[in-house]
Image: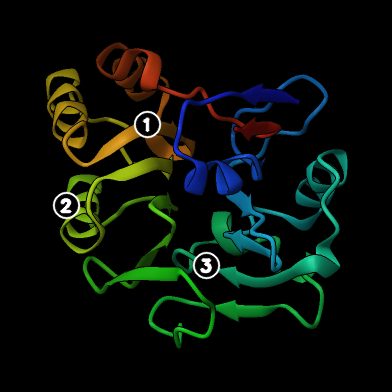
């Protein structure tokens, strides 16, 4: 496990101290990698899971290693219906509420979603200006801009940004644009190695190298 320490306000640190990357196609030593994404937010009133990775076996292994008790997960939000984000659904406790895109009924305090229908249904999760994304098929700049317009500048964006095969100049332009909308960034999953390298160059100390096993403070 690697702990990433950030300088943030008192309201946000309660969330960031409990943000754990459970599943990613990269993993820290001792954790298992798999194609997909899953992250856990742990507010004081119960954990919130975002996506479930590509399979239940690796999700369970990494979750246990990070001390996650799945019975404490009160809700799971699925970014979109691709197997690398839904493959671990069977791992969830039967009591955990699952929300696919467009299904959330505002039943939890301070949890918001951004819902998109193009190119297909997809949602992002926002909790106290922390935004989690699955693959960003609607476009990461578009998603971040909508979040900024609704909630102001974000503290952190974490997740996949769907930049495989994107030219370097375009990724750099995207990274520069995102600096307007978020303080910190933790790109992973389908962002790609090239994308992560460019984001690190653009964001500098505000870049977080997130992968399975990372805990962000």
Q: Which mark, residue 145?
A: 2
Q: How many marks?
A: 3
Q: Earlier in the sequence, mark 2 or mark 3?
A: 3
Q: From the viewer's perspective, is 91 left or right of 11?
A: right
Local secondary structure at mark 3: loop
Local secondary structure at mark 1: strand
Please determine whether, in this image, residue 82 is positioned above or below residue 199. Answer: below
Please determine whether, in this image, residue 74 is positioned above or below residue 66. Answer: below
Residue drawn at x 17%, y 22% is: 172
- Which residue is nearer to you in this view: 203 or 12? 12
Residue 13 at x, y = what percent?
55, 41
Residue 116 appears in which quarter of the rendering?
Answer: bottom left
Residue drawn at x 38%, y 82% is: 102
Which residue in the protein does label 3 denote? 78
Q: Earlier in the sequence, mark 1 or mark 3?
A: 3
Local crowd size for mark 1, using a 10 Å CA cut-off: few (<14), some (14–19), many (≥20): many
Which residue in the protein does label 1 denote? 184
Residue 1 at x, y = what percent?
76, 26
Q: From the viewer's perspective, is 179 left or right of 188?
A: left
Residue drawn at x 40%, y 40% is: 156
Q: Quadrant of the C terminus?
A: top right
Please determine whether, in this image, residue 154 is positioned above or below residue 89. Answer: above
Residue drawn at x 61%, y 28% is: 26
């Amino acid at each position: 496990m690697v702990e990433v320490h950030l300088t943030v306000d008192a309201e946000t640190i309660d969330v960031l101290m409990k943000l754990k990357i459970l599943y990613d196609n990269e993993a820290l030593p001792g954790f298992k990698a798999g194609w997909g994404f899953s992250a856990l937010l742990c507010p004081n009133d119960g954990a919130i899971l975002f996506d479930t990775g590509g399979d239940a076996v690796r999700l369970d292994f990494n979750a246990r290693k990070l001390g996650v008790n799945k019975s404490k997960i009160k809700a799971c939000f699925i970014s979109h219906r691709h197997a690398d984000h839904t493959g671990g659904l069977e791992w969830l406790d039967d009591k955990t509420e699952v929300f696919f895109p467009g299904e959330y009924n505002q039943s939890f305090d301070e949890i918001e979603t951004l819902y998109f229908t193009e190119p297909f249904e997809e949602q992002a999760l926002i909790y106290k200006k922390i935004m989690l994304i699955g693959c960003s098929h609607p476009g990461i700049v578009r998603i971040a801009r909508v979040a900024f317009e609704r909630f102001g500048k974000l503290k952190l964006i974490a997740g996949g940004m769907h930049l495989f095969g994107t030219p370097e100049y375009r990724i750099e332009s995207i990274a520069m644009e995102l600096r307007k909308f978020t303080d910190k960034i933790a790109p992973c999953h389908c962002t790609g190695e090239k994308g992560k390298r460019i984001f690190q160059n653009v964001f500098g100390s505000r870049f977080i190298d997130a992968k399975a096993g990372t805990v962000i403070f």
